[in-house]
Amino acid sequence: MTNYLLHLGSLLFIYILLAQSLNLILGAGKLFSLGHVALFGIGSYVTAIGAVDYGLDQWSLIFLSGVTSSVFASVIVFTSGRLKEEYFAVATLAFHYVVQSVFINFRTVTRGVMGIPGIPSLYDTSLDMFIFIFLVSTAGLLILKLVFNSRLTLLLRGLADSEIVASSLKIDPKIVRLKAFVISGFFCGVSGSLFAYYLKYIDPSSFALSEIMLLVTIVLIGRPGSFFGTVIASFFVILLPEAIRFVEFLQNYTSILGSLRQLIYSLILFFAIYLTREKIFGRVI
Amino acid sequence: MTQIFFNAAITASIYILCALSLTLVVRATGKFSFAIGYLVISGGYLFLAGGFFALLVGSIILGAIHYFFTLKPFHSKLLPLIATMAFGVFLESIISIYFGVDVKSLNVFSESINLFGGYITYLQLVMIFVALFISTIVLYCFHFTKWGLILRAGALSQSLGVNTEKISILTVIIGSLIAGIAGYFVGVDTNLSPTMGGFYSLKAFAVSVIGGVGSLYGCVVGGLFLSFVEQLILFISIGDFSVPSSYKDAVSFVLLLLVLLFRPDGLFQRRKRLV
């Protein structure tokens, strides 16, 4: 039981960091980025390849994963930064599929659908591993909290509200979005790195499109743009579907638990936006 | 060479139907939908469950749900996208609970014939002709019937007192039917798996962006263009380097990114974007 709780806690803190970095873009910037799971995956793959093939240590790999994801995040901005809302979503979805296709097909490096097993474990007990994830994730969250309080987030919100007003004040939308994406991408990479170290095995199916929906659900339920809202929503969204594990009736149907979890997420997401409609982003958009 | 042409035409028939479905939704409601690919996959699975009758009835019901729950209640551009994505993932999880997550095949056997030096089955010929037939009918109705007139007038007809809601419902349901038929083609041509929905949604986006968003001609032209590029790209080699066949789909999504970046109005469009 303790191990199960530690498992949940570790996943929870990985996802809080990931959701918070999406919150900076989707919540504060109102840019519907579907590429964040791809960035998360890039971080995971950098860590897995670095640890298995090159034997690098964890701190340099966490940093390296973050930097690599930042570079790809700036690729998103350069290719689709000037697109309007819905076209931005489509372009980032295309980015997601291109990255996933590389994960699956670039076999010499990523080993294709077989995935990368044998990532060395950092600590012997799951308690130590949890503490490691907790500390790294909390450090990341503290830095993100500073970013949320900074002028950058204010500019990002301003750009989301009216790009024309912001431009008239000599604010360059591209630079602001680039900075936000680089920061957000860095923490995506860090959480991806933690994910790889925690599971010790990664394959392309961990970074499927349905993961994006999980993140979008967290950000939208926790009031987009609110830092603590996202933290609380992560607890709610990650822990709630775990309850179905304990339903007696479902014990015989363990194969459908994953799909059932997805079903619950899609319903939560739908009702969250159906009930709040246009008010969810704090103003009519 | 003939074989390449046949392969491209078969893929194009699926792409054109997906994009037509998306474009009808865009013309009827002015909103993008992520659910198209999931409706396509649902069509294939509905056929697996109960033949053509189930496909027709199921697609009509799904189209109505698509309109009333995910498109109509939202008035911004962003929220329908999220709602249709939730709807799509909902369909995906229902399918994987009911049919299982493994790959299914429709197991339709058809004799293959030799035509102009390439091989093609009768069923694939039927697929190509059905796709041509559907796109001709939709294009004809769009330009020469009252339905098409109201659709083309868009918001203007609403201001003139026409009940556009009925037209919108009808159009979205027709779109859903077309997606369902595309799903049957997907099941016949390749395999069905519950997780392919997002992939076909993005293909629909790619085709309609390449052809120009909101343009019905663009769907046909874009679908043909994309499938021929996907087939021909495998034959291009620069020195020792050539594109491996597994990157075929990645190539089409890179093309989508490039078109969005440099020609957001579509490769073949000169007018301003409609939506």
Image (spheres, helix red, strand yellow):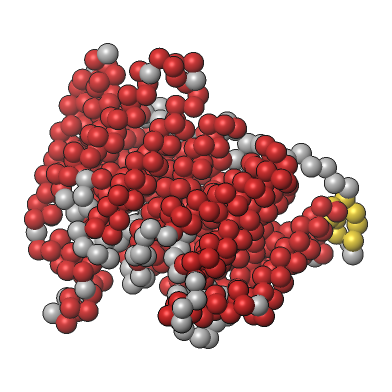
Residue at the image point whose x is 21% and y is 63% from the top:
A283
Q: Is residue A53 above or below residue B27?
A: above
Residue at the image point whose x is 19% and y is 58% from the top:
A282
Q: Position of residue A236 (x, y in %)?
A: 25, 34
Is residue B120 toward the left or the right of residue B268 in the image? right
Is residue A244 toward the left or the right of residue A138 in the image? right
Q: Is residue B233 above or below residue A201?
A: below
Q: Quadrant of residue B49?
A: top right
Residue at the image point whose x is 34% and y is 35% from the top:
A196
Residue at the image point whose x is 21% and y is 50% from the top:
A223
Q: Quadrant of residue B250?
A: bottom right
Q: Can residue A175 be seen?
A: no
Placement of the N terminus of chain A among the 4 image quadrants: top left
Placement of the C terminus of chain A among the 4 image quadrants: bottom left
Q: Position of residue A9 (x, y in %)?
A: 23, 27
Is residue A93 toward the left or the right of residue A20 in the image? right
Q: Quadrant of residue A251?
A: top left
